[in-house]
Amino acid sequence: MVIRMSYYLISVSNKENLNLCVKYSMAGFTNSLAGFWTYQEIDVGDYISFLYGARVHNLYRVMRKEAYRDAENLPPWKPITFRSGRTYSFPFRLYLKQERALNEPMVREEFSYVAENLLLRGGYRKTHFQGDTITFYNVSSMGEVFNGKTEELKIEGETFIPRIFFNKGKNTPPERFHFSELILQSLLKKYIMRGGVLKKILEIFSLKGEVKDFEVLGEKALPEGHVDILIKRKHPNAFSERVVIEVKTGKAGPSDRLQLEGYLRELGNECRGGILIGKNFSKKLFSDSLKKIVLMRYYFEDISLDGEYSFEELLKSIRLEVIR
């Protein structure tokens, strides 16, 4: 099993919320699918910075994660109401340890990987942006080591483990969410990172080097769209080889193949190929010529579609197999 840390920039909506995040060394995410997705994406041991006003604030390590019931009554964030009339609280929390103090503009070249995603994805509407290893190394030398203390916020609230269901029904956030493509992307990214699947993928595309030489990243933005999962070499050495992955919860078809082919063309010769992952596949995909594209089917072992499961339970059960 290979377990690696990741680095994320967390988008903060306003200055007041940023000040609360910094004051208590805590990040909070709303009772929405996007909030749940962010909470599941980021693991204990990962590193984060806050992103607000086109500036990157501080470097933290994630020490603990908790989901709280009745979050609308818990400090430090007040519920927010959008123009749609929907009101959101912040049940999903990350407890952080500040490692470095920094306040750097996003226009620095060192943030180019994240800045490109930020521009192509339409700004701060996305909850989080994953940085690559080079970005993390750069941030780790910015500012200065933090030797101060942050105020501890003790929360006396009931915690819970969010559940994911498959069959038809209503979402009841923050405790129950219907299985979706965002959830599947996170499951597959972590599965590839933790298991021997990455080694198999490197062999399929004749990529030289060991598993530790590559990283698995989520949602890379391109002018053609955004790649669901990107595998790339951590430290390019003359070449920056990549593999792109497109994920579908249901049946993948010719339009998905064309989309993936567009990503391959845009990334050029350094992109060694693409993987189309789906629950099943259109018959037409088996009659077409699939240059540089591999088909993989995902499935769950010992999972009933009538049941409800935690993210970790699904992660232990998810599997991939090469179809073509």
Image (spheres, helix red, strand yellow):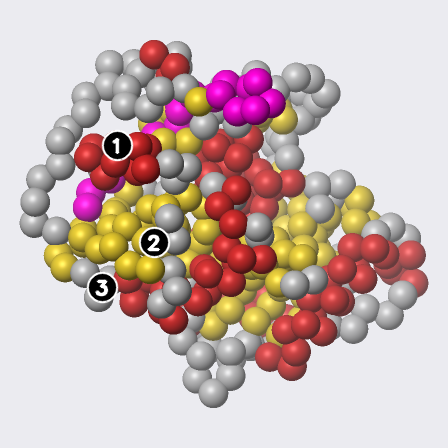
How far apart are the two marked residues, 1 and 2, measured between alpha carbons? 17 Å
Residue 235 located left or right of residue 224: left
- Under circle 3, the secondary element is loop
Res 177 quadrant in image: top right
Q: In this view of the protein, which residue sits in the foreground, 43 or 69?
A: 69
Q: Position of residue 55 (x, y in %)?
A: 34, 54
Residue 60 makes an appearance in the image: yes
Which span is picked out in magenta?
81-98
Q: Which residue is mark 1?
A: 20
Residue at figure coordinates x 13%, y 36% from the top left: 150
Give the quadrant of residue 2.
Answer: bottom left
> Is 139 contained in the magenta span?
no
Query: Cα distance, mark 3 to mark 1?
Result: 22 Å
Mark nearer the N terminus (1 vs 2): 1
Q: From the viewer's perspective, tell me whether residue 182 is left or right of residue 142.
A: right
- Name the residue carrying label 3: 142
